[in-house]
């Protein structure tokens, strides 16, 4: 369970960097990057609560998945309603920055699984020593 929190922290760092880059270079799209990141991080924190080992419930999981996609549909509709008069190119860039924010958890997972961040676990090598019954069968 510790690795899920590490992924959240990496995703939060990515979200902050995305917001800073958007603020510096693409000033008018910073809101959409922050909105996408906030919804993704909020959904991830809810998923952590739903999938805890001691209170896992399939109905809660399905309800959360429906809630997650409803949130995504709401922010997609909100971006559309806010940018429809600004032109098609502005709307496309707004959706791109929103998607970059939404992908923050996925990018956090990818970064977490890089070899220099996640150290492989050392497993014990077990040699298969044949017993007397196995050696007799040969």
Image: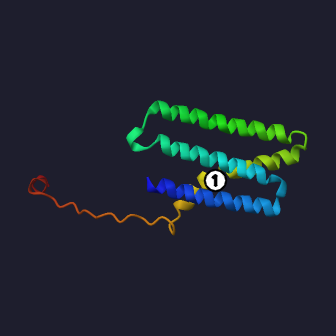
Residue 20 location (% of width, % of height): 74, 62
Image location of residue 26, percent across then percent down: 82, 58
Residue at 39% in and 43% down: 53
| Lateral position of residue 43 relative to residue 21, left or right | left
User: Which residue matches tag 1?
Assistant: 104
Q: Is residue 102 visible?
A: no
Q: Residue furthest bottom?
A: 116
Residue 121: image location, x then y, percent: 38, 64
Q: How many numbered markers are drawn? A: 1
What residue is drawn where x is 56% and y is 46%?
Answer: 44
Q: In this rendering, is residue 117 above or below 6?
A: below
Relative horizontal placement of residue 4, taking residue 107 as reference (left or right): left
Residue at x 81% of width, y 38% of height: 80
Characterize the local packing of mark 1: few (<14), some (14-19) or many (20 or more) Cα atoms within 10 angstroms.
many
Please tell me which residue lies in front, 120 or 41.
41
Q: Which quarter of the rendering shows the C terminus?
A: bottom left
């Amino acid at each position: 369970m510790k690795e899920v929190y590490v992924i959240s922290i990496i995703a939060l760092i990515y979200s902050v960097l995305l917001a800073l880059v958007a603020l510096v270079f693409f000033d008018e799209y910073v809101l959409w990057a922050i909105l996408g990141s906030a919804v993704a991080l909020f959904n991830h924190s809810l998923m952590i609560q739903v999938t805890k080992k001691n209170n896992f419930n399939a109905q809660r999981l399905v309800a959360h998945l429906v809630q997650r996609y409803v949130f995504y549909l709401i922010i997609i509709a909100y971006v559309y309603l806010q940018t429809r008069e600004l032109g098609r190119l502005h709307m496309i860039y707004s959706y791109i920055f929103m998607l970059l924010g939404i992908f923050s958890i996925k990018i956090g997972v990818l970064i977490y699984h890089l070899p220099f961040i996640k150290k492989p676990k050392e497993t014990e090598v077990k040699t298969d020593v044949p017993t007397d019954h196995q050696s007799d069968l040969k």
